[in-house]
Amino acid sequence: MIDSGKNKFGITAGARYLDLKLDTTIRLEDLKRKESRSGNVWDAVIGFRGRHDYPDGYYFNYYADVGSPS
């Protein structure tokens, strides 16, 4: 969106997918218990990213986003 030579700034939007699976085993002397859980979620995302260029080839990148669970 903005490119002034030293500074670049843009807006991002999209979707993110998260898929998790957790396997747990608990052992207490003669007792053994196994648990398994899983889940997934889609997430709408909007954010911004940019870059600032400093002299001598140094630069600073930045990025932030927020999402809302579906």
Image (cartoon, rainbow, N blue to C red):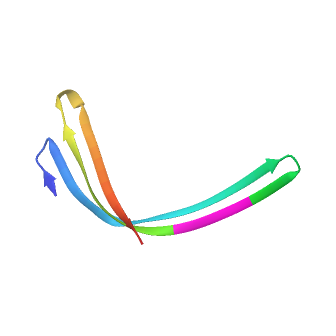
Of residues 19 and 7, the one nearer the viewer is: 19
Number of labels in the image equals 0
Q: x%, y% of residue 48?
A: 25, 55
Q: Is residue 36 magenta?
A: yes
Q: Quadrant of residue 36?
A: bottom right
Q: Is residue 37 magenta?
A: yes
Q: Residue at x 35, y 63 (%)?
A: 67
Magenta stretch, main secondary structure class:
strand
Q: Residue at x 72, y 60 (%)?
A: 35
Of residues 61 and 25, the one nearer the viewer is: 25
> Is 13 displayed left or right of 17 in the figure?
left
Residue that lies at the very extreme toward the left in this rendered image: 4
Q: Quadrant of the N terminus?
A: bottom left
> Is 30 displayed left or right of 2 in the figure?
right
Q: Quadrant of residue 7?
A: top left
> Is 20 displayed left or right of 17 in the figure?
right
Q: Quadrant of the C terminus?
A: bottom left
Q: Residue at x 23, y 31 (%)?
A: 57
Of residues 17 and 58, the one nearer the viewer is: 17
Q: x%, y% of residue 14?
A: 34, 66
> Is 65 displayed left or right of 21 in the figure?
left
| 4 w.r.t. 65: above or below | above
Q: Residue at x 49, y 68 (%)?
A: 41
**What stretch of residues is rendered in magenta?**
35-40
